[in-house]
Image (tube, rainbow, N blue to C red):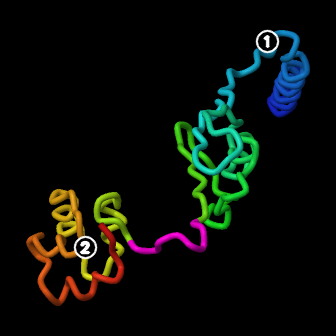
Amino acid sequence: MEAPRDRARTAVAAAGFVLAALVALAPHLWPHRPSPTVEDPDLAVAVTGAVAAPGTYLLPWGARVADAVEAAGGTAPDAAADLLAPARLLVDGERVHVPASRPADADPRISLNEASVHELERLPGVGPALAQRIVADRPYHRVEDLQRVRGIGPVTYQRLADRIRP
């Protein structure tokens, strides 16, 4: 007759053997099924402005601004590529606009008739509300016409007169 201590050792050894056998045979008993993976989708990116071939391009996930510009055939000769952040990651549905550099003889003044609210806000003393009123009061035939906008007094007008055009 076995002692209780010997029986416990035998049971532990048998359980260990069974466990080792299950681990060794597991791949054969339960075939491996690959877990479903989500592939990184392509990004649809619109490239506009001073590039060789503006358009919408499918780029791989993880693409950067430089990849989008390259897909559009690279920058045009008049591109202001230094204004881009080429290493910035893209997101799906994004638009990358490559601005054209302004020719040296271009008029640096802001057009009252063509500037966006955002562009007008760059003028000294012009905030969002005043910029909106300037846009709402278009068209302007002369720079002096700006004085009819509520909020443009003599001091503000003098500050802006050299920086704007109709």
With 90 as the anchor, is 166 left or right in this view?
A: left
- Residue position marked by numbered label 1 in the rendering: 30
Query: Quick check: can you spot residue 10?
Result: no
With 155 as the anchor, is 1 left or right in this view?
A: right
- Residue position marked by numbered label 2 in the rendering: 143
Q: Residue at x 56, y 50 (%)?
A: 97
Residue 95 x, y percent position in the rendering: 54, 44
- Residue 141: name its quadrant: bottom left
Residue 15 x, y percent position in the rendering: 82, 24
Q: Residue at x 20, y 65 (%)?
A: 134
- Residue type pointed to by label 1: Trp
User: In terms of sequence position, does the residue under pointer 2 or pointer 1 come before the other?
Assistant: 1
54, 57: nearer the viewer:
54
Magenta run includes residue 121: no
Q: Is residue 16 above or below residue 148?
A: above
Query: Quick check: can you spot residue 18?
Result: yes
Q: Residue at x 23, y 69 (%)?
A: 142
